[in-house]
Amino acid sequence: MDPLSEVLSLFKPRSYVAGGFEIPGEMAIQWPRHEGIKCYAVVSGQCWLSVEGVPDTVLLTAGDCYLLPPGAPFRLATDLAAPPVEFLTLRAKWRSEDGRAEKRESSCYLVGGHFVLTGSHADFLLNSLAPIVHIRRESDKAAMRWSLERMAQEVRESQPGGSLITQQLAYMMLVQALRLHLAEGAKEGVGWLFALADKQMGAAIRCMHDDPAHDWTLQKLAQRVGMSRSVFALRFKQTVGTTPMEYLTRWRMLLAGDKLKNSRESTTAIALSLGYESDSAFGKAFKRVMGCSPREHGRATAAGKLQLDGAALSVS
């Protein structure tokens, strides 16, 4: 499995909502702060996206996709001069009117999904994202066209199993958007996500992901990618934002956290599987990275799962 797939699998994005919605003409809709990642694309029409704290307003046209990491309130508008309407208020109104907004020529229709990352340390992925990820190049839009059109059809034409297909298509859009963002930001972006697009840094990361238990050293990794030790260390830090050994330790601890949560392996077995010869050395590394002991992590994730499973899912 490639590193991006591994990370997404580890964080287990849970779809809170997947589907489509329409912004009527001459309207602005305000969303509150949100958890998780929102990934939507414009099927028809156009609208403007503005995020609190980001100075520039983004114009979204048919085929454009936007991805928002957790955080700031944002606004979508078909008319920048229109007074904003709170989404929660509008949603309640639409539901009372059988879910249909008034259609106008200048309306904008979007499809996508809202995902919450249920794995620990999701900032491993989220810190690599800009406040607004805007997929707009024609070649990128062409790459997303099939999933976008297929999802729009599933949303508009109710069929057996449509909800599940819509969720899977929304997830496909998310992965595709991340992959396109990775390629576009390869030269100037900082973080492991962008490093994957760099031939040598990506190779080093794949080495660590393919065999996390290996006794990797700076010298061994540099030799694998055909670079001197000093040049590799500097380049990795500049591209990824952390040292190779720090990255390796954090990746091992993320894998350990997942195993503690989702398997019945003992702490000793998990430590050995990740290259640690003693529970003590593993425990110290785990607490340094994760902020708690392996045992405390297991208890916390079990309690968190019960709380999450019992919570009602929010919409959009």
Image (cartoon, rainbow, N blue to C red):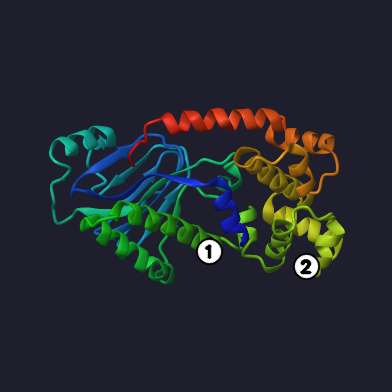
**Image position, residue 162 (x, y; %):** 29, 55
Q: Residue at x 27, y 59 (%)?
A: 154
Q: Residue at x 73, y 57 (%)?
A: 208
Q: Is residue 228 left or right of residue 203?
A: right
Which residue type carries mark 1?
Glu
- Between 166 and 35, the one nearer to me in the picture: 166
Residue 107 seen anywhere in this rendered image of the structure: yes
- Between 270 and 293, the one nearer to me in the picture: 270
Q: Quadrant of residue 302?
A: top right
Q: Earlier in the sequence, mark 1 or mark 2?
A: 1
* Vertical placement of residue 70 versus 206, above or below: above
**Image position, residue 146 (x, y; %):** 35, 68
Q: Is residue 8 left or right of residue 191?
A: left
Q: Quadrant of the N terminus?
A: bottom right
Q: Secondary structure at mark 2?
A: loop
**Image position, residue 32 (x, y; %):** 36, 34
Q: Quadrant of the C terminus?
A: top left
Q: Residue most toward the front?
A: 264
Q: Residue at x 59, y 62 (%)?
A: 186
Q: Residue at x 33, y 55 (%)?
A: 166
Q: How many marks?
A: 2
- Between 247 and 67, the one nearer to me in the picture: 247
**Residue 184, labelled with which disc?**
1
Graded by Cα atoms within 10 Å as few (under 14), some (14 to 19) or many (20 or more), the crowding at tag 2 reads some
**Image position, residue 266 (x, y; %):** 72, 38
**Residue 225, labelled with which disc?**
2
Q: Quadrant of residue 170?
A: bottom left
* Vertical placement of residue 125 versus 197, above or below: above
Q: Secondary structure at mark 1?
A: helix
Q: CA distance from mark 1 to mark 2?
A: 23 Å
